[in-house]
Amino acid sequence: MKSRPNILWIVTTQWRAQACGYAGDPNARTPHLDALAAESVNFAEAVTPHPFGPQARAALLTGVRSPANGVREYFDALPAGARTIAQAMRDRGYATAFFGKWGVGKRDENVPLVGEAAAKVIVPEGARGGFEVWDGFEGGFQLNDPWRHGRRSEAPQRERGYQSDAVCGWAADFVAEAASGRRPWFAVVSLEAPHPPYDAPAAGIAARAAGEIVLAANVPRGGAIEEKARRELAGYYAHLEATDRAIGRMLLPAARREDTAVVFTSVHGDMHGAHGLFRKGWPHEESVRVPLLVRRPGETARTSRAAVSVADLPAWARAWADGQPTPGDARGEAEISMPAVVALPHQCDRIWRGLRSPQRKLVVDGSGKPWLFFDLERDPGEQENLVGRAERAAEVAAWRARLQARA
């Protein structure tokens, strides 16, 4: 009889915190995640440590923020000697498994980021973070008919169907196999959806009518930005719905409530026209805030306003394996940053660091000069930058000092 919980991480890409039915988004159809939220601790103020894939994934796997974990630039690979959560859990007697998008492997900068060539990049056995079972792909954003290598075949093999369905199926098979074993298990399920291309087919779920999408007040109206936001969000919400369905059909039934801790989150969000911006890397809420649900055996469902980060998850998993409570559940501030500029269209144009609480957010540029300061209680859409306002100077200085103390 296993006395320690099994642990399942479900990690998506570009799924921003607001884009869930349980979070009040009128566009989102996420009945399975809404049901999970009703049984979970909803960390409603959760953030990504870095709103870009490789940096965030490296922090998620190691519990160490970028660039200290070895990943600063977009094309940096996770160093071979990096200690990951898989190794920590194996030391605790857990069987470990990873399924889906890896995203921190060695890549050729000349290979297009989207398409078959990127999807067939091999992640060698020694570069898989110490997971005993590894079945997935480096990237490629093949939301349909993904490529797969690792557990089943060291050569990439084409899988038919929607990527979220396929990856959730691989993981569900592992969970069923592991249920008869004597060791508790730790598994990561990493999905590329709802990352672009937003116009890709979404497992039979039709894109919404662009004109019916409800836009936030901070999306400029009446021009190309609104048009682009509506067009992309129409496909985005179809992929959210398709991925919610895959998670609900395959993973959640496999993860028994009585002995499995389930975590649902995303590595970053997407601006989708807010402030006239698109994609990620930006310090705004649409980019840095992510969903984070935790359903643990014996824990009561509630909403937490703690300032937690995706980078906290490795410490949480270790604590649960050791029979300890969730650490940091009362923390007041979380650090966010982009350690490098990613030279891709629409991404943030500067290096920055920031400190965020549920009430305030300060962001400084690469030189340490205050760039953004928002009163999130009064202005959750971040439409009034308070940097330079005389009546806020002392507050900005105090936040800047706290951020500098973390360096």
Image (cartoon, grey):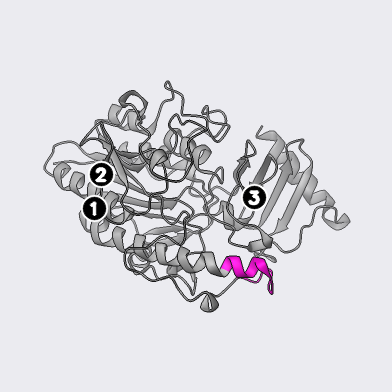
Relative horizontal placement of residue 277, taking residue 193 as reference (left or right): right
Q: Residue 43: x and y, percent?
A: 47, 56
- Quarter of the image for residue 270 reads bottom right
Query: In percent of the image, x 55 and y 43: which residue is there?
Result: 49
Q: Which amino acid does label 1 sit on?
A: Ala
Q: Image quadrant for the C terminus?
A: top right
Q: How far apart are marks 2 and 1 (CA)?
A: 8 Å
Going from N to C along the chain, the mark reached first, 3 or 2, is 2
Residue 53 visible (yes or no): yes
- Residue 101 shown in magenta: no
Going from N to C along the chain, the mark reached first, 2 or 1, is 2
- The extreme right residue here reads 390
Q: Which mark is residue 255?
A: 1
Relative horizontal placement of residue 16, taking residue 381 as reference (left or right): left
Relative horizontal placement of residue 351, taking residue 92 as reference (left or right): right
Q: Image quadrant for the N terminus?
A: top left
Q: Distance between the residues labelled 3 and 2?
A: 34 Å
Query: In percent of the image, x 17 and y 42: which residue is there?
Result: 178
Vertical relation: 112 (above or below) 329: above
Going from N to C along the chain, the mark reached first, 3 or 1, is 1
Q: Which amino acid does label 3 sit on?
A: Pro
Find the magenta span and give its range: 216-229
> Which residue is under mark 2?
6
- The extreme bottom residue here reads 212
> Which residue is under mark 3?
283
- The extreme top residue here reads 81
Badge 3: few (under 14), some or many (20 or more) residues near its Cα, within 10 Å?
many
Q: Which amino acid does label 2 sit on?
A: Asn
Q: Distance between the residues labelled 3 and 1?
A: 34 Å
Asked if the residues shown at circle 2 and circle 1 are in contact, with their CB atoms under 8 angstroms apart, the answer is yes
Q: Residue 70: x and y, percent?
A: 52, 27
Task: State the SS at label 3.
Answer: loop
